[in-house]
Each structure stands twice: as structure tokens, then as C-alpha cells.
């Protein structure tokens, strides 16, 4: 799953500092929800995520009310231009092409 999010201007350093150490309970929650890998690239204010998970919708459902994720999302809400309130389907960026 490929995703795009955007930082609030001036929050770049804080975002990277916050991600330098992910809370242990969030790591466990992500893995229990089926996440095998989650990588994030930053280009200015734009963030590009690649999440390796078998069922992205099930992952979001599992994390929606998980205490570790609720706290993390509250932190991210202060850094991101648009808060993820888990209300949408979250279909990600559509795949256009891949090298076979």
C-alpha cells in the first residue's frame, strides 16, 4: 500500500525526531495488525509511505481504537496537514505501473 501525507510547514524536524524512536507498544500493535514493513520518505513537506500488509482495511480497523495508535495519532495530528481520523476507506495511492 502506497500512501501520501503532508506535513504542516515548519514541522519537518519535529516529525523526523518523533519518528526516530517508535513507541514499543505501537510497534507491537502494528505487527499484531499484520504490518510487515512501513517505510516513509520525505520530500519537503510531502511524505510517501509504503506499507507491507496483507489486508490494509483490516489493519486500520484493528488500529482505529487501539490505545497505542490513538496516542500516536494525537501526536501526528499536530504535525500533519490533515489528521487521519480513520473515517475513510483509506485506499492509498493507485498503482499505475510496475516493472514486471
Image: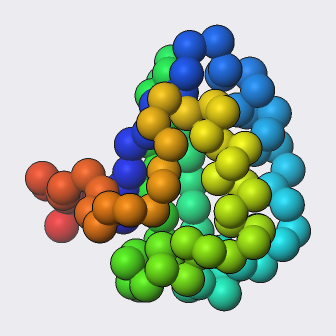
Residue shown at 84% from the left, 72% from the top:
25
- Seen in the picture, residue 58 relative to 48 is either above or below; the reply is below
Q: Position of residue 43 (x, y in %)?
A: 48, 24
Q: Reply above or below: 43 against 19.
A: above
Which of 53 and 77 lies nearest the eye of the viewer? 77
Task: Report the front residue among 16 and 91.
Answer: 91
Could you tell me which residue is drawn at 26 percent across and 52 percent down?
Answer: 93
Residue 38: x and y, percent?
A: 57, 61
Q: Is residue 61 above or below residue 26?
A: below
Q: Nearer the viewer, residue 67 or 90?
A: 67
Q: Quadrant of residue 88?
A: bottom left
Left or right placement of residue 42 versus residue 24 in this view: left
Quadrant where the C terminus is found in the figure: bottom left
User: Is residue 53 something one can see in this rendering?
Assistant: no
Q: Is residue 42 left or right of residue 87?
A: right
Q: Residue 3: image x %, image y %?
A: 38, 51
In the picture, measured across the screen, residue 35 lies left or right of residue 85, that is: right
Q: How many marks?
A: 0
Amino acid at each position: 500500500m502506497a500512501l501520501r501525507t503532508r506535513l504542516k510547514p515548519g514541522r519537518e524536524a519535529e516529525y523526523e525526531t518523533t519518528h526516530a524512536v517508535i513507541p514499543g507498544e505501537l510497534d507491537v500493535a502494528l505487527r499484531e495488525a499484520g504490518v510487515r514493513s512501513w517505510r516513509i520518505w520525505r520530500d519537503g513537506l510531502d511524505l510517501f509511505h509504503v506499507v507491507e500488509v496483507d489486508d490494509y482495511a483490516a489493519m486500520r480497523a484493528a488500529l482505529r481504537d487501539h490505545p497505542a495508535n490513538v496516542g500516536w495519532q494525537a501526536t501526528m495530528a499536530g504535525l500533519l496537514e490533515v489528521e487521519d481520523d480513520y473515517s475513510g476507506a483509506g485506499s492509498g495511492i493507485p498503482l499505475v505501473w510496475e516493472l514486471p
